[in-house]
Amino acid sequence: MISLFLDILFPPACAGCRIHKGSLLCRQCERAIMTARMQENRCPVCDHRLEGSACEFCAIQPLALRQIISLGPYEGVLQNSIMAFKFRKQKRLAANLGQLMADILLANCKTHPDCILFPPMQKDRLQERGYNTAELLARTIGSAAHIPVWDIFGRSRTAPPQRTLGRAERITNVQQLFIIKKDLQLLPGKHIVIADDVTTTGSTLNALAQECLNAGAAAVVGITAAYPAAKW
Ligand SMILES: [Zn+2]
Ligand SMILES: [Zn+2]
């Protein structure tokens, strides 16, 4: 309520272009994100922009996921919005980014998903930030696409944040890190979506997907706001 009142007094500038006022992510920026997606030649498995005909990302990282769907590379307007969402407390951007992610999920997912899951955050980091960005995105996508969101993952130990590690370390860092804390009977035969903000090497999504597949899930698809624009 207070934030609504403040928005009227001081209309927010768009987190994407920092020019247009009145919404956290303006129409032009939303359109720019979706148009870039349509024009890019993308890998049908990991959604990365293809330079040649073969996908370098898939060649070095076999995925447990059937597919990863992303809004686009972590650059420009999309990067600005995600940075504001993750690091500048602009929690409400989950609504804008999540809605775009729901649109591309429904357009690209062959089977209607049974549920959306999200990576759990370590307690100390959750307290520091105040919210789990992946969970907020999952909940927006869930309500926009009419898919239930299940909070089923826990962590077996503390681990350094993935973004502080190199490629090989990221893979070992998440080995046996995630546990399914709810009833495993939920998962057999299910088509599952796992939502995250940014995927780099895909190691976190892969580790979570593997847990679901071990518990009998039929297939797992990842949905992320962005993948890295530079070499991962
Ligand atoms: Zn804008
Ligand atoms: Zn690929």
Image: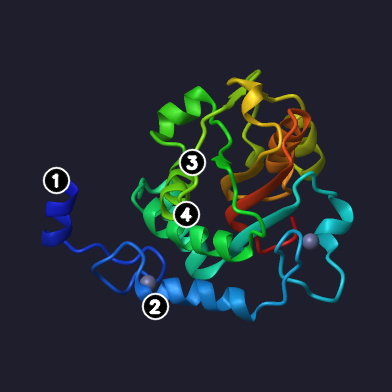
The reply, left or right, for residue 6 in relation to residue 23 is left
Give the number of the mark in front: 3 or 1: 3
Where 60 sits versus 216, above or below? below
Q: Quadrant of the C terminus?
A: bottom right
Q: How far separated are the C-alphas under marks 4 and 1? A: 29 Å
Q: Which mark is residue 28?
A: 2
Look at label 3 and name its amino acid.
Pro
Q: How far separated are the C-alphas under marks 3 and 4? A: 9 Å
Q: How far separated are the C-alphas under marks 3 and 1? A: 29 Å
Residues at marks 3 and 1 touching, judged by CB atoms closer than 8 Å: no
Closest to the observer: 58 or 79? 58
Q: How far separated are the C-alphas under marks 1 and 2? A: 27 Å
Look at label 2 and name its amino acid.
Gln
Q: How far separated are the C-alphas under marks 3 and 2? A: 30 Å
- Percent position (x, y) of residue 187? 66, 31
Earlier along the polypeptide chain: callout 3 or callout 2?
A: 2
The reply, left or right, for residue 169 in relation to residue 227 is right
- Percent position (x, y) of residue 149? 49, 39
Q: Dot 3: what SS?
A: loop
- Percent position (x, y) of residue 110? 67, 60
- Percent position (x, y) of residue 92? 33, 50
Q: Dot 1: what SS?
A: helix
Quadrant in which ligand 2 is drawn: bottom right
Q: Which mark is residue 2?
A: 1
Residues at marks 3 and 4 touching, judged by CB atoms closer than 8 Å: no
Where 178 sits versus 74, above or below? above
Q: Rate crowding at label 2 as few (under 14), some (14 to 19) or many (20 or more) other CA atoms within 10 Å.
A: few
